[in-house]
Amino acid sequence: MADGFNVGIVGAGTIGQVHSRALERIPNARVVAVAEPREEAGRALATATNAVWYDSFVDMLAHPGLDVVILGTPSGLHPEQSILAAGAGKHVITEKPMSITHDGATRMIEATDRAGVRLAVIFQNRLSRDVFKVRRAIEAGLVGTPIFGTAFVYWMRTQDYYDANGGWRGTWALDGGGVLINQSIHMIDALQWLMGGVASVQAHVATLGHRIETEDAGAASVRFTSGALGAILGTTASKKDHPTKIEIIGSEGRVVLENNAVSFWEGTAELSDDLLTDDDRRLVDGWKPDESFGEGHLRQLTLIFDSLAAGEEPPFPGREARRAVDVILGIYESARTGQRIDIARI
Ligand SMILES: NC(=O)c1ccc[n+]([C@@H]2O[C@H](COP(=O)([O-])OP(=O)(O)OC[C@H]3O[C@@H](n4cnc5c(N)ncnc54)[C@H](O)[C@@H]3O)[C@@H](O)[C@H]2O)c1
């Protein structure tokens, strides 16, 4: 790592390629290895990055000088791959969801702690200047007492999307669910952070527009730890992608975030940049409201590699990223059992 980090990308699919493009623009990291069982995809990404292709992740871990692995694999594989990488002394950067079970997430945290390596989870949408400003505004009481916090994700995913690359998406075993754990998790993560944590959920799920095992529509009623209430709605059965929406209403104001940018603000004071701490500014540096897919990965990966170089905790650590997983697992359990689920006991 003397002149930067040697990185192995695991999974040469959609997001593996996003990571690889981002890494081209990160001076202190370079791709040296690609692990991918699909030979054509693996070789193509390895050639594009001047790296070595491995058909086996375990073999890739023995690549000379490898420092970091990035997991862009089906979500259900993240815990075992993280634990193996940590055991081999590699830092782990994993895509969301970090795990499809609470136990898997906990084992990842424990394994990386034990090995003295870092675990960072990608949640590029949370790294928005506006999301941070809204969080600080709520903390400062600028919307008064929070009453409702809601998150809506209405996106379109084709049947082909679910059938691609072995058809792992929309399965319980590898996706861990459907639209809630794969797509809506970004907004669920942001909402739970903005509102200060979820206490309990009560939910319904349905499969309305695809041939998949898991849900493509989910609706949950939420009680936050503050006592505020809320709702989460997510679907991939919409005709097109609509902007994601988070709306918070309090006794003194209301704020709406669309695609992580504030589209409406009413509070007891301006929603000013002065609300941000120095740490916040560092995390959201370079964010712009209309950022395209991939730019958020570049910003988060830059922060992660800078943190690794400085020996600091990179954003977002496993304990933080597990919160959204727990909320979603609570939603699934509620939908299955018809019961209200306390998130603390997930
Ligand atoms: N942050 C985001 O916005 C974002 C966007 C898309 C996907 N993701 C996440 O990225 C992960 C991958 O999703 P995707 O859409 O890129 O899927 P994908 O199917 O396009 O890519 C996954 C790749 O992993 C490969 N793979 C399967 N088993 C493997 C193994 N044992 N070792 C190495 N490679 C293996 C597959 O062959 C495939 O090429 C998921 O966890 C998903 O939730 C995150």
Image: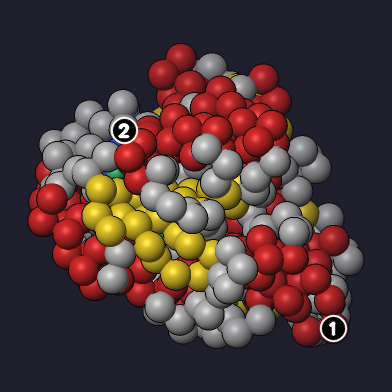
Residue 313 in sight here = yes
| Residue at 50% across, 77% down | 26
| Residue at 35% across, 74% down | 21
Can you identify the residue that label 2 sits on? 174
Q: Place residue 266 in its image quadrant.
A: bottom right
Bin the neighbour count of mark 1 within 10 Å (Cα to Cα): few under 14, some 14-19, many 20 and up: few
Q: Position of residue 173 (x, y in %)?
A: 31, 26
- Please identify the residue farthest to the right as the structure is shown: 140
Can you identify the residue that label 1 sits on? 274
Left of 224 or right of it: where is 303?
left
Q: Position of residue 68 (x, y in %)?
A: 51, 54
Residue 254 in sight here = no
| Residue at 84% across, 73% down | 277
Label 2 CB-ligand 1 distance < 8 A: no
Q: Place residue 257 in its image quadrant.
A: bottom right
Q: Hey, what amino acid is under mark 2?
A: Leu
